[in-house]
């Protein structure tokens, strides 16, 4: 406890001044650790750093190993060498870090309290539930501040975890008193946050919550669920929005949006419930809004610019942006032009927007943009007013990938992104799944001409749109072209 073994190698003064909880520097174990004496009693260590974790468990993955120098001082105490000067925090190899720490998701609530919104963290496995509770009490990551809420009371009593083992070996966590005392409605939301957060821990997938000696069971009406990406693929056909649900069928694919059936469109997208629809015209200069059942009259919601592919949230807004950004994005309402909003994002000012996509939780957003320094993939969140109307995007956090010249990024899972770009070593077009917590997993080598990507962990598949109207899909092993002319695949 309290890093007693590590402190045994420090002098008494150094131990008193050392703050191990300041953060973690994770270095590559495959690179040689260089140690050199720079002065009498002083050593310099050179590490190849691959990621860093701050004091709240937020991990920053670097694009590649980066050399970092640290200096320590040593002196003899009772004939034994001890460290007399060390930097705060701890330093672990990748292997040691993955043995001692585990990824977790702290779940907060979207501003409408309809979805659980994940905030990925890393915590010491030995602390498990206690670390999760403390994280929930501590609040969300900076990029989620102002965009999410929580029913977990921000008091010390909320993080008091009493853990036991049930008769079947399942971990049981007693609901902290501060949560148990909440009124019925906020208590249900707090319990949903707590249960989902604890279940995300690697050692605790079967956790049970216990309140006053009884297991807590949330029924379907009381439960607020995680928001996952859709599993039904669609694409732009020669005209209209077509279904890719049965790519091997001999019949022509179904047209999903009657009002657009005869229109040449690009970048089509449907809302998660399958009603609201949006697309650009073939040139990308107009954004069209329609519906699959005729409930929303077709309208040109944005015109006269070069627009990125639209994205739809379940609050009824179609998101897009002009490619040349003036520091705002557009939220176009399915209820009519009078509800359209221009949403501030000052950090985008002067950048070229390549793509954006709102997550299924209607809160987090991926924004891919570029300037003279290259492409950058950002993760931000939508701030809404009390009526649920979007007002701003939060300051983003950067999502690192090993690809250069990224051309598209789409949600694949709750905290994973399908990315299409260029492999720096070979110059080849490649696709990968980037887990926001743990890093990238490459997909099979692509055939020439890949220009767009969409994936779904729920459907366990990734689709690629290629030049000349080719569509391909993969289950992770290889790419298979389908006998359907189309492009710009997406999921709903």
Image (cartoon, rainbow, N blue to C red):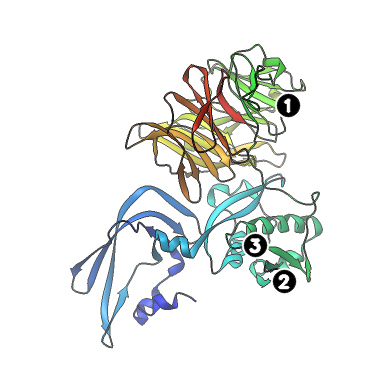
169 vs 202, left or right, is right
Secondary structure under the numbered disc 1 in the rendered image: loop
**How many C-alpha atoms fall within 10 Å of the one at disc 3: few (<14), some, or many (≥20)?**
some
| Residue 16 point in image, percent of width and height | 40, 78
Q: At 70% from the left edge and 68% from the top edge, which residue is drawn?
A: 168
Element under label 2? loop
In the rendered view, tell whether residue 150 sits above or below residue 442.
Answer: below
> Are circles 1 and 2 on residues that touch, CB within 8 Å?
no
Q: In which quarter of the view is residue 185 placed? A: bottom right
The number of callouts visible is 3
Q: Earlier in the sequence, mark 1 or mark 2?
A: 2
Q: Where is residue 218 drawn, in percent x and y?
A: 78, 56
The residue that label 1 is drawn on is: 335
Of the numbered discs in the image, which one, if any, rests on residue 243?
Answer: none
Write down the quadrant of residue 85 in the picture: bottom left
| Residue placed most toward the observer, 461 or 242 | 461
Q: Which of pointers 1 and 2 indicates the residue nearer the eye?
A: 2
Quadrant of the image occupied by residue 370? top left
Vertical arrangement, residue 392 with respect to residue 333, above or below: below
Where is the C terminus found, in terms of image quarters?
top right
Percent position (x, y) of residue 396? 50, 43
Q: Which residue is mark 2?
A: 167
- Residue, disc 3: 154
Q: CA distance from mark 1 to mark 2?
A: 53 Å
């Amino acid at each position: 406890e309290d890093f007693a073994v590590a402190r045994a190698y420090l002098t008494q003064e150094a131990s008193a001044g050392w703050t191990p909880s300041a953060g973690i520097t994770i270095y590559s174990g495959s690179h040689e650790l260089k140690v050199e004496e720079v002065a009498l009693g002083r050593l310099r260590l050179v590490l190849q750093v691959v990621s860093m974790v701050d004091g709240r468990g937020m991990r920053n993955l670097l694009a590649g190993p980066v050399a970092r120098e640290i200096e320590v001082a040593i002196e003899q105490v009772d004939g034994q060498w001890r460290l007399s000067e060390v930097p705060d925090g701890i330093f672990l190899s990748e292997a040691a870090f993955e043995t001692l720490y585990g990824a977790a998701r702290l779940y907060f609530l979207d501003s409408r309290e309809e979805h659980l919104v994940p905030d990925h963290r890393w915590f010491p496995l030995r602390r498990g539930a206690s670390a999760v509770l403390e994280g929930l009490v501590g609040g969300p990551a900076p990029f989620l501040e102002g965009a999410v809420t929580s029913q977990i009371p921000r008091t010390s009593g909320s993080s008091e975890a009493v853990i036991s083992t049930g008769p079947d070996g399942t971990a049981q966590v007693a609901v902290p008193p501060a949560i148990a005392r909440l009124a019925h409605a906020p208590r249900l939301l707090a319990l949903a946050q707590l249960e989902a957060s604890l279940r995300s821990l690697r050692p605790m997938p079967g956790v049970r919550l216990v309140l006053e000696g009884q297991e807590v069971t949330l029924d379907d009406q009381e439960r607020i669920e995680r928001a996952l990406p859709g599993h039904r693929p669609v694409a732009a056909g020669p005209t209209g929005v077509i279904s890719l649900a049965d790519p091997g069928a001999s019949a022509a694919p179904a047209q999903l949006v009657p009002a657009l059936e005869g229109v040449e469109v690009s970048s089509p997208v449907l809302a998660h419930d399958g009603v609201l629809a949006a697309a650009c015209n073939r040139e990308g200069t107009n954004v069209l809004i329609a519906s699959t059942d005729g409930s929303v009259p077709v309208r040109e919601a944005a015109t006269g610019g070069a627009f990125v592919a639209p994205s739809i949230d379940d609050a009824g807004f179609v998101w897009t942006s002009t490619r040349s950004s003036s520091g705002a994005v557009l939220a176009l309402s399915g209820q009519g032009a009078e509800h359209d909003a221009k949403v501030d994002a000052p950090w985008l000012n002067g950048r070229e927007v390549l793509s954006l996509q709102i997550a299924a939780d209607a809160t987090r957003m991926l924004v891919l943009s570029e300037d003279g320094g290259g492409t950058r993939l950002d993760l931000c969140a939508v701030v809404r007013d009390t009526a649920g109307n979007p007002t701003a995007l939060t300051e983003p956090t950067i999502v690192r990938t090993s690809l250069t010249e990224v051309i598209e990024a789409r949600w694949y899972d709750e905290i994973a992104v399908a990315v299409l770009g260029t492999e720096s070593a070979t110059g080849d077009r490649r696709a990968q799944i980037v887990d926001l917590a743990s890093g990238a997993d490459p997909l099979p080598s692509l055939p020439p001409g890949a220009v767009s990507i969409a994936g779904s962990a729920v459907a366990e598949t990734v689709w690629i749109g290629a030049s000349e109207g080719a569509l391909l899909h993969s289950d992770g092993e290889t790419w298979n072209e389908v006998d359907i002319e189309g492009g710009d695949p997406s999921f709903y």
